Structures are given as C-alpha cells and as structure tokens.
Amino acid sequence: MGRSRHLPRRDTADPRRHRTRVRTVADGDEVLPGVHVVALPGHTPGQFGFTVTGDHSRLLAFADVMHSPLQVQNPDWAVLGEPDPAASGTTRRRVLEDLAEEGTIGFGIHFADVPFGTVRNGQWVPYDEE
C-alpha cells in the first residue's frame, strides 16, 4: 500500500525542524512594521490581539474579547466558561476605550455579519454604516 496523501511525511512533521521559526511575543511587541501585539487577558489564557497602524488610521483586532456587539453596551456580560470574568470585563472596557478613539477601526471575529466597526456613543457602528 502506498503512502497516504493525508499524513505528513516524517521529515516535515519533526518539530525540531521548525524550532527557529517560533518566537515568543509580549504586549506591545512589534511583530511586523506597524503591527503590534496587544495582551487581552481574561477570556482565554495567553490571549492576544493585534493593532495594525497606518498613516491615518488603526485597526484593532480584538480576538475573543467580545462575542457580540451587545457586549459593547454591556462590557461586564461574561461569556460562558471564561476563567476570569472580572479580568475579561476590565479588558473589554479597555478595548472599548481604544475603539472609541478617532481613526480606530475594530475587528471582532465573532461579530458575524458586522465584524468591522467603531464605537460611537457606546454603540457598535458597523464600518459600512459610517
């Protein structure tokens, strides 16, 4: 029987082969020009997002910090299974302050059909409605 196309070859599956490609990062580290790591504690241990800064705007990709635009108005609403709901609420409030800054666009992976937007007057405003 021939080699399966779905199983990795032994030489490419060896983790020692890729060890120089792994690098740890910390809050504030620049991983590419204009791309910085943002620590987002509370919801998932070790969770982080990114800011991508351009000439006149900034994108904040906030990962799992919020699962619904409803949490923009209710940052203390926890997501089931969060290991530290208090820290999550603190992180959500900090992210919301950042999203309210002029020129900042947010990206919420769980915001279904409105993942890009800003925060204005305590409301999530989808990017296409600005």
Image (cartoon, grey):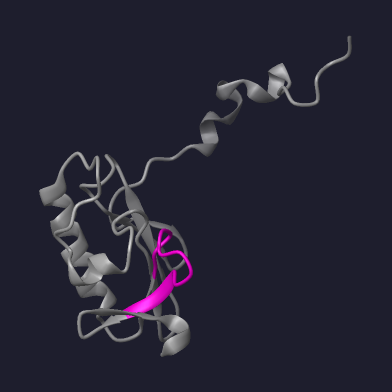
Q: Residue at x 43, y 88 (%)?
A: 129
Q: Residue at x 18, y 65 (%)?
A: 94
Quadrant assignment, res 71: bottom left
Against 47, residue 102 (above or below) is: below
Q: Residue furthest left?
A: 86
Q: Nearer the viewer, residue 19 or 39?
A: 39
Against 70, residue 128 (above or below) is: below
Q: Nearer the viewer, residue 44 or 28?
A: 44
Q: Residue at x 83, y 16 (%)?
A: 3
Majority secondary structure in the magenta region? loop
Magenta span has 35?
no
Quadrant assignment, res 99: bottom left
Q: Residue furthest top?
A: 1
Q: Residue furthest right?
A: 1
Quadrant in the picture for the C terminus: bottom left
Indicate the position of residue 90 as horizontal and vertical percent values: 13, 58
Indicate the position of residue 64 as horizontal and vertical percent values: 34, 53
Q: Is residue 88 left or right of residue 127?
A: left
Indicate the position of residue 35 as horizontal and vertical percent values: 43, 64
Q: Nearer the viewer, residue 41 or 12?
A: 41
Indicate the position of residue 79 as horizontal and vertical percent values: 25, 50
* Range of magenta residues: 107-118
Quadrant in the picture for the N terminus: top right
Quadrant assignment, res 50: bottom left
Q: Residue at x 26, y 53 (%)?
A: 40
Magenta span has 113?
yes
Against 45, residue 37 (above or below) is: below
| Count of marks placed on residues | 0
